Image (tube, helix red, strand yellow):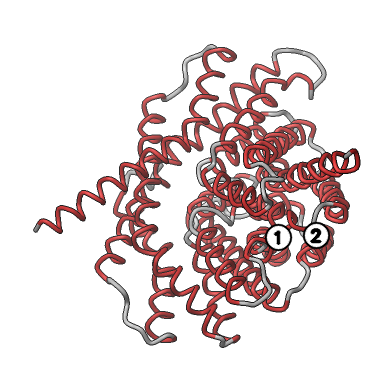
Amino acid sequence: MELFLDPMKLLLATAKDVLPVLGLLVLFQMVVLRKPLPRPGRIIFGFCLVLVGMACFLGGLDLALFPVGRTMALQLAKGAQSGGREIWAAYGWIYLFAFLVGFSTTIAEPSLIAVANKAEEASYKAVSSLGLRIAVALGVAVGITLGTFRIVTGTPLYIYILAGYVVVAIQTYFAPRMIIPLAYDSGGVTTSTVTVPLVAALGLGLASNVPGRSPVLDGFGLIAFASLFPIISVLGYAQMVQWIVGRRNRKT
Amino acid sequence: MAMRTGILHDLIKTIGAALLGACRDLAPIVVVIALFQVLVLRQPFPELFSVLAGLGLVIVGLAFFVVGLDIGLFPLGETLAEEFAHKGSLVWLLVFAFALGFGTTVAEPALIAVTREGARAAAEAALIDNTSAVIQRYALHVRLTVAFSVGIAIVLGVLRILRGWSLPMIVVGGYVLVMVMTLFAPKEIVGLAYDLGGVTTSTVTVPLVTALGVGLARTIRGRNPLTDGFGLIALASLTPMIFVMVLGLFVH
């Protein structure tokens, strides 16, 4: 908030963040490859746009997405505490909210659509683009939901991640080899720049409002779950497709 | 003069398209939150005006950021990645790979946002001093650690593509390392470290790193751009978890 009131300071801080990238690229182009910069005016203009854009984005995060994530966590947690049911069951609305945010932001994610289309092409339509997108979106949605359940119950994060890793390792052994690198990457690609801050704020807000949880110990993990579960769901989808195709071939 | 207006016209068109794209990114979140406010919580949203202003800033910022990247940094980065993939000098290729991973990650907006939240949470829990200088330094250290580990991941990924190492072996090995580090790292950093794995790779990193991977897989005989080009992102989501936990050993 204090940063937003001082746009010059925010712009300067952003410049410090982005300058290294430009510096590196220019250095490699001019010193290592010994070639002049192509269209320097265009590069500088693009860089200025990046600067202004990032400053606006970070300012907007502080005004909108962070408070929204925290407020939703606060309001939904308050509603749950007036119930008087079993502690984890009382937070039903939170789980539904987490699931919907995860599914809806992922299914429309442009980079996922691009990757899914490429995979459909490369597999000669064995893997359908829409099927893959649904698999990833379900993975993210289930991941974030389970992450909120973990925050509510306060169980240790590493147990879930360890179990997830074991499942991924077993699936890797059985899944068709072509899909493996794509499945591994789908975990990292799907969490977009807009979703990440909101989900992070939701987790931290939830941990500070559920009695007995601490933000530092329990508030994280939602993004980790959202990156792990798509790997499992994409590998699972590929295995399912393989099984169906295999059974059809045996019949004919 | 006519050419100038042509360029301006194109620019307005691209920014318009980027604005639409940013709105589409945010739309699912806004719809889900609005649904919950109206149907479940049935209470007015606090500070609605500042949240709306913030959302506007996020949309404008994201659009400018993406257009700036498209016209300034991406063309330069992509030609560089192609040139280094073709050049044949292994040392320079690896140096470039590290610099690309490091430089793009440092400038990742989602990473800046989440490290800031993580530092604030650490300060609230009294793990570090609650002054803005200390918080900023802590966030910067975490961010640099993540950028360093993504650099290492890209170097490892490039070597994998060149030598044809098996991706599952490296990833499962990485999983084991993550679990071993979890045993030793202070438990306050584990959640943040796990989350940072998923945060690192988005708007800036994915396109440039994918360009490098696909360019490399294309120049080497007998490599398939789909199976060998992917996999860099997976490694870049894995190493930050390990290195941030190492950082935790030193800080806490």
The residue carrying mark 2 is B175
Q: Quadrant of residue B159?
A: bottom right
| Rendered position, A151 above or below A90 | below
Q: Tag 2: Cα neighbours inside 10 Å, few (<14), some, or many (≥20)?
A: many
Q: Nearer the viewer, residue B40 or A73?
A: B40
Chain ID of residue with mark 2: B
Q: Give the tally of numbered discs.
A: 2
Q: Which residue is at a point 71% across and 44% down the rendered structure image?
A: A230
| B227 lies left or right of B92 | right
The spot of residue B220 in percent (x, y) is 63, 77
| Rendered position, B166 above or below A241 | below
Label 2 sits on what residue type? Tyr
Whether the residues at callouts 1 and 2 have beta carbons within 8 Å, the answer is yes
Q: Nearer the viewer, residue B229 or B38?
A: B229
Chain ID of residue with mark 1: B
The residue carrying mark 1 is B238
Q: Nearer the viewer, residue A5 or A188?
A: A188
Q: Residue furthest front?
A: A252
The spot of residue A205 in percent (x, y) is 61, 34
The spot of residue A36 in percent (x, y) is 32, 81
